[in-house]
Amino acid sequence: MNDYKALYARKKLTADEVAARVENGWLIGMDAAIGQTPAIIDAICRRAESSSLSGVRVQMLLDTYPYAFFADDHLSGRVTGESWFASGGARKALAAGIADYIPNYYRDCPRHIRANYEYDAFCVSVSPMDKHGYFSLGTVSSYSPAMIDKAKHIFVEVNENTPRAVCGTQLHISQIDGLVENTFDLPTLPAPTLDEVSITIGNLIAELIPDGACIQLGIGAIPDAVGMALKSKHDLGIHTEMFTSSMVDLIECGAVNNSRKQIHRGKSVTTFAFGSKAINDYIDDNPAIEILPVDYVNNPEVICQNDNMISINAALEVDLFGQVCAESIGTKIMSGSGGQVDYVRGACQSKGGKSFIAFSSTAKGGTISKIKPVLTPGAVVTTSKNDVDYIVTEYGIAHLRGQTLSSRVSQLIAIAHPDFRDELRFEAKKRGILI
Protein backbone atom coordinates (compact mmCIF):
# COMPACT_ATOMS: atom_id res chain seq x y z
CA MET A 1 0.00 0.00 0.00
CA ASN A 2 1.33 3.43 -0.91
CA ASP A 3 2.24 5.57 2.07
CA TYR A 4 0.99 8.92 0.79
CA LYS A 5 1.42 10.57 4.18
CA ALA A 6 5.14 9.75 4.17
CA LEU A 7 5.47 11.16 0.65
CA TYR A 8 3.59 14.26 1.78
CA ALA A 9 6.02 14.73 4.67
CA ARG A 10 9.06 14.39 2.38
CA LYS A 11 7.72 17.02 -0.02
CA LYS A 12 6.71 19.52 2.66
CA LEU A 13 8.66 22.79 2.34
CA THR A 14 8.51 26.38 3.48
CA ALA A 15 7.68 29.12 0.99
CA ASP A 16 11.28 30.35 1.27
CA GLU A 17 12.57 26.87 0.41
CA VAL A 18 10.43 26.85 -2.73
CA ALA A 19 11.70 30.32 -3.62
CA ALA A 20 15.29 29.12 -3.19
CA ARG A 21 14.74 26.62 -6.03
CA VAL A 22 13.74 29.33 -8.51
CA GLU A 23 16.42 30.20 -11.06
CA ASN A 24 17.09 33.23 -13.23
CA GLY A 25 14.77 33.48 -16.23
CA TRP A 26 12.10 31.13 -14.90
CA LEU A 27 8.56 31.36 -16.23
CA ILE A 28 6.05 30.61 -13.47
CA GLY A 29 2.35 30.02 -14.16
CA MET A 30 -0.70 30.41 -11.94
CA ASP A 31 -4.42 30.22 -12.65
CA ALA A 32 -7.25 32.51 -11.51
CA ALA A 33 -8.36 34.03 -8.23
CA ILE A 34 -8.08 31.79 -5.17
CA GLY A 35 -6.18 29.19 -7.18
CA GLN A 36 -3.07 31.37 -6.71
CA THR A 37 -0.25 30.91 -4.19
CA PRO A 38 0.42 34.14 -2.27
CA ALA A 39 3.01 32.75 0.16
CA ILE A 40 5.19 31.24 -2.56
CA ILE A 41 5.04 34.30 -4.80
CA ASP A 42 5.77 36.65 -1.88
CA ALA A 43 8.80 34.52 -0.99
CA ILE A 44 10.06 34.68 -4.58
CA CYS A 45 9.70 38.47 -4.55
CA ARG A 46 11.57 38.73 -1.23
CA ARG A 47 14.39 36.62 -2.63
CA ALA A 48 14.55 38.78 -5.76
CA GLU A 49 14.80 41.90 -3.61
CA SER A 50 17.70 40.53 -1.57
CA SER A 51 19.69 38.55 -4.15
CA SER A 52 20.76 38.45 -7.76
CA LEU A 53 17.64 36.56 -8.87
CA SER A 54 16.37 38.18 -12.07
CA GLY A 55 14.37 37.67 -15.25
CA VAL A 56 11.54 35.79 -13.52
CA ARG A 57 8.11 36.09 -15.14
CA VAL A 58 4.85 35.20 -13.42
CA GLN A 59 1.71 34.61 -15.50
CA MET A 60 -1.76 34.67 -13.97
CA LEU A 61 -5.40 35.53 -14.46
CA LEU A 62 -7.41 37.71 -12.04
CA ASP A 63 -4.75 38.61 -9.49
CA THR A 64 -6.64 38.23 -6.23
CA TYR A 65 -3.71 38.96 -3.92
CA PRO A 66 -1.47 42.07 -3.68
CA TYR A 67 1.74 41.10 -5.48
CA ALA A 68 4.87 43.21 -5.07
CA PHE A 69 5.74 43.16 -8.78
CA PHE A 70 2.42 44.88 -9.55
CA ALA A 71 2.84 47.50 -6.81
CA ASP A 72 5.83 49.53 -8.04
CA ASP A 73 8.96 49.29 -10.15
CA HIS A 74 11.42 48.19 -7.46
CA LEU A 75 11.33 44.64 -8.86
CA SER A 76 11.75 45.78 -12.46
CA GLY A 77 13.95 43.32 -14.33
CA ARG A 78 13.80 40.86 -11.45
CA VAL A 79 10.17 39.70 -11.34
CA THR A 80 7.63 40.74 -13.98
CA GLY A 81 3.92 40.01 -13.89
CA GLU A 82 2.09 38.94 -17.05
CA SER A 83 -1.70 38.92 -16.98
CA TRP A 84 -4.17 36.99 -19.13
CA PHE A 85 -6.93 39.45 -18.13
CA ALA A 86 -5.44 42.73 -16.85
CA SER A 87 -7.52 43.18 -13.73
CA GLY A 88 -6.82 44.35 -10.18
CA GLY A 89 -3.19 45.18 -9.50
CA ALA A 90 -2.21 44.17 -13.02
CA ARG A 91 -4.34 46.99 -14.42
CA LYS A 92 -2.43 49.61 -12.44
CA ALA A 93 0.90 48.00 -13.25
CA LEU A 94 0.11 48.01 -16.97
CA ALA A 95 -0.74 51.70 -16.81
CA ALA A 96 2.61 52.28 -15.06
CA GLY A 97 4.49 50.27 -17.69
CA ILE A 98 5.84 47.67 -15.25
CA ALA A 99 3.73 44.65 -16.28
CA ASP A 100 2.70 42.89 -19.46
CA TYR A 101 -0.57 41.60 -20.87
CA ILE A 102 -1.50 38.68 -23.13
CA PRO A 103 -4.55 39.51 -25.31
CA ASN A 104 -6.75 36.45 -25.76
CA TYR A 105 -10.15 34.85 -25.82
CA TYR A 106 -10.36 33.02 -22.49
CA ARG A 107 -11.28 29.74 -24.20
CA ASP A 108 -7.98 29.86 -26.11
CA CYS A 109 -5.69 30.16 -23.07
CA PRO A 110 -4.99 26.40 -22.84
CA ARG A 111 -4.14 26.33 -26.56
CA HIS A 112 -1.74 29.27 -26.22
CA ILE A 113 -0.16 27.71 -23.14
CA ARG A 114 0.47 24.40 -24.86
CA ALA A 115 1.70 25.98 -28.10
CA ASN A 116 3.69 29.00 -26.99
CA TYR A 117 5.10 28.53 -23.50
CA GLU A 118 7.41 26.28 -21.49
CA TYR A 119 6.80 26.70 -17.77
CA ASP A 120 9.55 26.12 -15.26
CA ALA A 121 6.94 25.93 -12.52
CA PHE A 122 3.20 25.84 -12.01
CA CYS A 123 2.03 27.09 -8.61
CA VAL A 124 -1.49 26.42 -7.36
CA SER A 125 -3.51 26.50 -4.17
CA VAL A 126 -5.16 23.19 -3.25
CA SER A 127 -7.37 21.57 -0.65
CA PRO A 128 -5.87 19.10 1.87
CA MET A 129 -4.80 15.72 0.48
CA ASP A 130 -7.40 12.95 0.55
CA LYS A 131 -6.76 9.35 1.57
CA HIS A 132 -5.89 8.43 -2.02
CA GLY A 133 -3.14 11.05 -2.30
CA TYR A 134 -5.11 13.60 -4.32
CA PHE A 135 -5.43 17.35 -3.89
CA SER A 136 -8.37 19.29 -5.34
CA LEU A 137 -7.65 22.55 -7.12
CA GLY A 138 -10.75 23.88 -5.42
CA THR A 139 -12.81 26.43 -7.27
CA VAL A 140 -10.55 26.69 -10.33
CA SER A 141 -9.96 24.49 -13.38
CA SER A 142 -9.65 27.11 -16.12
CA TYR A 143 -6.30 26.51 -17.86
CA SER A 144 -4.68 24.61 -14.95
CA PRO A 145 -4.58 21.25 -16.81
CA ALA A 146 -2.62 22.85 -19.64
CA MET A 147 -0.08 24.37 -17.24
CA ILE A 148 0.22 21.07 -15.40
CA ASP A 149 1.07 19.42 -18.71
CA LYS A 150 3.68 22.04 -19.62
CA ALA A 151 5.35 22.66 -16.24
CA LYS A 152 8.74 21.19 -15.31
CA HIS A 153 7.93 21.61 -11.61
CA ILE A 154 4.67 21.83 -9.65
CA PHE A 155 4.46 23.56 -6.27
CA VAL A 156 1.26 23.75 -4.24
CA GLU A 157 -0.01 25.66 -1.25
CA VAL A 158 -2.25 23.52 0.93
CA ASN A 159 -5.01 25.60 2.50
CA GLU A 160 -7.49 23.87 4.79
CA ASN A 161 -10.11 26.42 3.73
CA THR A 162 -9.87 25.56 0.03
CA PRO A 163 -13.02 23.58 -0.88
CA ARG A 164 -12.71 20.09 -2.28
CA ALA A 165 -14.32 20.07 -5.70
CA VAL A 166 -15.11 16.43 -6.42
CA CYS A 167 -15.89 17.21 -10.08
CA GLY A 168 -12.87 19.40 -10.76
CA THR A 169 -9.17 19.19 -11.55
CA GLN A 170 -7.08 17.04 -9.19
CA LEU A 171 -3.35 16.70 -8.54
CA HIS A 172 -1.73 13.61 -7.05
CA ILE A 173 1.04 13.84 -4.47
CA SER A 174 3.32 11.99 -6.89
CA GLN A 175 2.98 14.84 -9.42
CA ILE A 176 4.16 17.65 -7.20
CA ASP A 177 7.71 18.75 -6.38
CA GLY A 178 6.94 20.57 -3.17
CA LEU A 179 4.09 21.69 -0.95
CA VAL A 180 3.68 24.58 1.45
CA GLU A 181 1.04 24.52 4.17
CA ASN A 182 -0.61 27.95 4.30
CA THR A 183 -4.02 28.07 5.94
CA PHE A 184 -5.84 31.41 5.89
CA ASP A 185 -9.32 32.73 5.17
CA LEU A 186 -9.85 32.81 1.41
CA PRO A 187 -10.48 36.23 -0.12
CA THR A 188 -14.05 37.08 -1.06
CA LEU A 189 -15.74 39.69 -3.18
CA PRO A 190 -18.03 42.19 -1.43
CA ALA A 191 -21.64 41.98 -2.55
CA PRO A 192 -22.34 44.80 -5.03
CA THR A 193 -24.87 47.47 -4.11
CA LEU A 194 -28.02 47.10 -6.20
CA ASP A 195 -29.08 50.61 -7.17
CA GLU A 196 -32.25 51.57 -9.02
CA VAL A 197 -30.52 51.44 -12.41
CA SER A 198 -29.20 47.92 -11.86
CA ILE A 199 -32.54 46.66 -10.62
CA THR A 200 -34.34 48.19 -13.61
CA ILE A 201 -31.92 46.59 -16.05
CA GLY A 202 -32.14 43.25 -14.23
CA ASN A 203 -35.92 43.25 -14.48
CA LEU A 204 -35.86 44.16 -18.18
CA ILE A 205 -33.57 41.24 -18.98
CA ALA A 206 -35.43 38.78 -16.75
CA GLU A 207 -38.63 39.41 -18.71
CA LEU A 208 -36.96 37.89 -21.81
CA ILE A 209 -35.62 34.80 -20.02
CA PRO A 210 -37.99 31.83 -20.18
CA ASP A 211 -38.38 29.02 -17.68
CA GLY A 212 -35.91 26.25 -18.48
CA ALA A 213 -33.26 28.64 -19.82
CA CYS A 214 -29.55 28.00 -19.22
CA ILE A 215 -27.73 31.05 -17.91
CA GLN A 216 -24.29 32.65 -17.85
CA LEU A 217 -23.92 35.64 -15.55
CA GLY A 218 -20.94 37.91 -15.18
CA ILE A 219 -19.97 39.74 -12.02
CA GLY A 220 -21.27 43.02 -10.64
CA ALA A 221 -24.46 44.82 -9.73
CA ILE A 222 -26.34 44.18 -12.98
CA PRO A 223 -25.76 40.40 -13.13
CA ASP A 224 -26.69 40.22 -9.43
CA ALA A 225 -29.85 42.19 -10.16
CA VAL A 226 -30.68 39.75 -12.96
CA GLY A 227 -30.16 36.91 -10.50
CA MET A 228 -32.56 38.52 -8.04
CA ALA A 229 -35.16 38.95 -10.79
CA LEU A 230 -34.84 35.31 -11.83
CA LYS A 231 -35.84 33.86 -8.46
CA SER A 232 -39.42 33.44 -9.64
CA LYS A 233 -38.35 31.36 -12.67
CA HIS A 234 -38.43 27.57 -12.87
CA ASP A 235 -36.07 24.82 -14.06
CA LEU A 236 -33.17 27.14 -14.92
CA GLY A 237 -29.74 25.70 -15.69
CA ILE A 238 -26.20 27.02 -15.27
CA HIS A 239 -23.37 26.84 -17.81
CA THR A 240 -21.06 29.72 -17.04
CA GLU A 241 -17.49 30.92 -17.11
CA MET A 242 -17.61 32.23 -13.53
CA PHE A 243 -19.80 30.75 -10.82
CA THR A 244 -21.10 33.65 -8.70
CA SER A 245 -22.86 34.26 -5.41
CA SER A 246 -26.16 35.03 -7.16
CA MET A 247 -26.07 31.54 -8.68
CA VAL A 248 -25.90 29.95 -5.24
CA ASP A 249 -28.96 32.01 -4.32
CA LEU A 250 -30.81 30.78 -7.42
CA ILE A 251 -29.98 27.17 -6.60
CA GLU A 252 -31.00 27.47 -2.97
CA CYS A 253 -34.34 29.13 -3.79
CA GLY A 254 -35.15 26.38 -6.30
CA ALA A 255 -35.10 28.49 -9.47
CA VAL A 256 -32.07 26.52 -10.74
CA ASN A 257 -32.21 22.74 -10.85
CA ASN A 258 -30.49 22.08 -14.22
CA SER A 259 -33.28 19.64 -15.12
CA ARG A 260 -33.86 20.89 -18.66
CA LYS A 261 -30.28 21.19 -19.90
CA GLN A 262 -29.31 19.25 -23.00
CA ILE A 263 -25.77 18.53 -21.72
CA HIS A 264 -24.59 18.03 -18.14
CA ARG A 265 -28.19 17.66 -17.05
CA GLY A 266 -28.57 17.98 -13.31
CA LYS A 267 -25.19 19.72 -12.96
CA SER A 268 -24.05 23.33 -12.81
CA VAL A 269 -21.01 23.82 -15.05
CA THR A 270 -18.30 26.45 -14.62
CA THR A 271 -14.57 26.92 -15.14
CA PHE A 272 -13.91 28.85 -11.92
CA ALA A 273 -15.82 30.27 -8.97
CA PHE A 274 -15.13 33.35 -6.91
CA GLY A 275 -17.24 35.52 -4.65
CA SER A 276 -18.69 34.82 -1.23
CA LYS A 277 -17.86 32.20 1.38
CA ALA A 278 -21.23 30.66 0.48
CA ILE A 279 -19.76 29.69 -2.91
CA ASN A 280 -16.90 27.79 -1.31
CA ASP A 281 -19.26 26.06 1.10
CA TYR A 282 -21.55 25.06 -1.77
CA ILE A 283 -18.72 23.62 -3.88
CA ASP A 284 -17.11 21.63 -1.09
CA ASP A 285 -17.71 17.88 -1.66
CA ASN A 286 -20.66 18.69 -3.97
CA PRO A 287 -21.02 16.49 -7.08
CA ALA A 288 -23.77 18.81 -8.41
CA ILE A 289 -21.20 21.31 -9.69
CA GLU A 290 -18.59 20.53 -12.34
CA ILE A 291 -15.52 22.79 -12.53
CA LEU A 292 -14.05 22.04 -15.94
CA PRO A 293 -11.29 23.43 -18.22
CA VAL A 294 -12.09 26.68 -20.00
CA ASP A 295 -11.37 25.36 -23.50
CA TYR A 296 -14.43 23.14 -22.99
CA VAL A 297 -16.67 25.34 -20.84
CA ASN A 298 -16.20 28.47 -22.99
CA ASN A 299 -16.24 26.73 -26.36
CA PRO A 300 -19.19 28.26 -28.31
CA GLU A 301 -19.81 24.87 -29.92
CA VAL A 302 -20.34 23.43 -26.43
CA ILE A 303 -22.25 26.41 -25.03
CA CYS A 304 -24.82 26.33 -27.82
CA GLN A 305 -25.74 22.71 -27.16
CA ASN A 306 -27.98 23.91 -24.33
CA ASP A 307 -31.25 25.35 -25.67
CA ASN A 308 -32.33 28.83 -24.57
CA MET A 309 -28.79 29.73 -23.57
CA ILE A 310 -28.73 33.19 -22.00
CA SER A 311 -25.53 35.23 -21.78
CA ILE A 312 -25.31 38.44 -19.74
CA ASN A 313 -22.17 40.59 -19.88
CA ALA A 314 -21.09 44.21 -19.47
CA ALA A 315 -19.56 47.02 -21.51
CA LEU A 316 -17.76 50.29 -20.98
CA GLU A 317 -19.18 51.84 -24.15
CA VAL A 318 -20.98 50.97 -27.38
CA ASP A 319 -20.99 52.89 -30.65
CA LEU A 320 -23.88 53.36 -33.06
CA PHE A 321 -22.72 50.45 -35.21
CA GLY A 322 -23.11 48.21 -32.17
CA GLN A 323 -19.40 47.70 -31.53
CA VAL A 324 -18.85 46.83 -27.87
CA CYS A 325 -15.83 47.98 -25.89
CA ALA A 326 -15.57 46.13 -22.58
CA GLU A 327 -11.86 46.33 -21.82
CA SER A 328 -10.37 49.78 -22.26
CA ILE A 329 -11.04 53.48 -21.85
CA GLY A 330 -9.43 54.77 -24.98
CA THR A 331 -5.97 53.23 -24.92
CA LYS A 332 -6.00 52.62 -21.15
CA ILE A 333 -6.41 48.89 -20.53
CA MET A 334 -9.05 48.12 -17.89
CA SER A 335 -9.48 44.35 -18.35
CA GLY A 336 -9.30 41.60 -20.95
CA SER A 337 -11.78 40.11 -23.39
CA GLY A 338 -12.37 37.24 -20.99
CA GLY A 339 -15.20 35.02 -22.12
CA GLN A 340 -17.60 37.69 -23.37
CA VAL A 341 -17.27 36.80 -27.05
CA ASP A 342 -17.30 33.07 -26.24
CA TYR A 343 -20.74 33.39 -24.64
CA VAL A 344 -22.13 35.95 -27.08
CA ARG A 345 -21.43 33.51 -29.90
CA GLY A 346 -22.48 30.41 -27.96
CA ALA A 347 -25.78 31.96 -26.87
CA CYS A 348 -26.59 33.24 -30.36
CA GLN A 349 -25.96 29.78 -31.84
CA SER A 350 -28.21 28.15 -29.23
CA LYS A 351 -31.79 27.25 -30.10
CA GLY A 352 -33.80 30.06 -28.51
CA GLY A 353 -30.64 31.63 -27.08
CA LYS A 354 -30.08 35.31 -26.38
CA SER A 355 -27.01 37.39 -25.58
CA PHE A 356 -27.32 40.59 -23.54
CA ILE A 357 -24.72 43.34 -23.14
CA ALA A 358 -25.97 45.45 -20.25
CA PHE A 359 -24.75 48.70 -18.66
CA SER A 360 -25.97 51.97 -17.20
CA SER A 361 -26.54 54.62 -19.87
CA THR A 362 -24.06 57.15 -18.46
CA ALA A 363 -20.76 57.46 -16.60
CA LYS A 364 -19.16 60.06 -14.34
CA GLY A 365 -22.34 61.23 -12.67
CA GLY A 366 -24.35 61.40 -15.87
CA THR A 367 -21.89 63.62 -17.73
CA ILE A 368 -20.80 61.00 -20.30
CA SER A 369 -22.99 58.80 -22.50
CA LYS A 370 -21.88 55.19 -22.78
CA ILE A 371 -23.65 54.99 -26.15
CA LYS A 372 -21.49 57.04 -28.49
CA PRO A 373 -21.42 57.99 -32.18
CA VAL A 374 -17.95 56.38 -32.36
CA LEU A 375 -15.89 54.61 -29.75
CA THR A 376 -13.32 56.64 -27.86
CA PRO A 377 -10.15 56.81 -30.00
CA GLY A 378 -7.97 53.82 -29.18
CA ALA A 379 -10.81 51.85 -27.58
CA VAL A 380 -10.57 48.07 -27.93
CA VAL A 381 -13.47 46.36 -29.73
CA THR A 382 -14.37 43.36 -27.60
CA THR A 383 -17.55 42.18 -29.31
CA SER A 384 -17.95 43.04 -32.97
CA LYS A 385 -21.01 44.61 -34.55
CA ASN A 386 -21.69 41.29 -36.31
CA ASP A 387 -21.78 39.30 -33.06
CA VAL A 388 -23.75 41.63 -30.82
CA ASP A 389 -27.35 40.61 -30.04
CA TYR A 390 -29.18 42.65 -27.37
CA ILE A 391 -27.96 45.91 -25.79
CA VAL A 392 -29.66 46.93 -22.53
CA THR A 393 -29.67 50.12 -20.45
CA GLU A 394 -32.11 51.36 -17.83
CA TYR A 395 -34.06 52.95 -20.71
CA GLY A 396 -34.85 49.74 -22.54
CA ILE A 397 -33.58 46.99 -24.82
CA ALA A 398 -32.20 47.28 -28.35
CA HIS A 399 -32.18 44.11 -30.47
CA LEU A 400 -29.40 44.62 -33.01
CA ARG A 401 -28.64 41.21 -34.44
CA GLY A 402 -29.79 40.92 -38.05
CA GLN A 403 -31.09 44.51 -38.13
CA THR A 404 -30.26 47.25 -40.62
CA LEU A 405 -27.75 49.88 -39.60
CA SER A 406 -30.45 52.54 -39.48
CA SER A 407 -32.59 50.33 -37.23
CA ARG A 408 -29.62 49.69 -34.95
CA VAL A 409 -28.94 53.41 -34.68
CA SER A 410 -32.58 54.24 -33.92
CA GLN A 411 -32.82 51.54 -31.25
CA LEU A 412 -29.55 52.54 -29.57
CA ILE A 413 -30.53 56.22 -29.48
CA ALA A 414 -33.85 55.22 -27.92
CA ILE A 415 -32.12 53.49 -24.97
CA ALA A 416 -29.46 56.20 -24.49
CA HIS A 417 -29.91 58.72 -21.69
CA PRO A 418 -32.42 61.41 -22.82
CA ASP A 419 -29.82 64.14 -22.32
CA PHE A 420 -27.71 62.71 -25.15
CA ARG A 421 -30.30 61.54 -27.66
CA ASP A 422 -30.41 64.74 -29.73
CA GLU A 423 -26.63 64.81 -30.02
CA LEU A 424 -26.53 61.15 -31.02
CA ARG A 425 -29.25 61.69 -33.62
CA PHE A 426 -27.39 64.71 -35.04
CA GLU A 427 -24.11 62.77 -35.28
CA ALA A 428 -25.85 59.78 -36.86
CA LYS A 429 -27.49 61.91 -39.56
CA LYS A 430 -24.23 63.74 -40.20
CA ARG A 431 -22.59 60.39 -40.86
CA GLY A 432 -25.43 59.18 -43.03
CA ILE A 433 -26.22 56.15 -40.87
CA LEU A 434 -29.76 57.14 -39.83
CA ILE A 435 -32.47 57.21 -42.45
Image (cartoon, grey):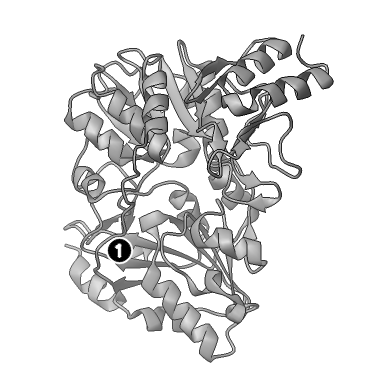
Position of the N terminus by quadrant:
bottom left
Q: Secondary structure at mark 1?
A: helix
Asked whether, in this view, residue 325 is left or right of residue 87, the answer is: right
Res 210 → quadrant: top left
Res 238 → quadrant: top left
Position of the C terminus by quadrant:
top right
| Figure check: 237 above or below 46 | above
Residue 58: % across, % down = 54, 66
Tell me if mark 1 has few (under 14), some (14-19) or many (20+) residues whose alpha carbon lies within 10 angstroms of its own.
many
Q: Out of 162 and 186, give the one closest to the viewer.
A: 186
Q: Is residue 313 visible?
A: yes
Asked whether, in this view, residue 375 is left or right of residue 22, the answer is: right
Q: Is residue 24 visible?
A: no
What amino acid type should be assigned to the residue bearing mark 1? Ile
Residue 392: % across, % down = 51, 24
Residue at point 66%, 14% (across, down): 410
Residue at point 44%, 19% (across, down): 305
Identify the residue position indicated by label 1 in the image. 173
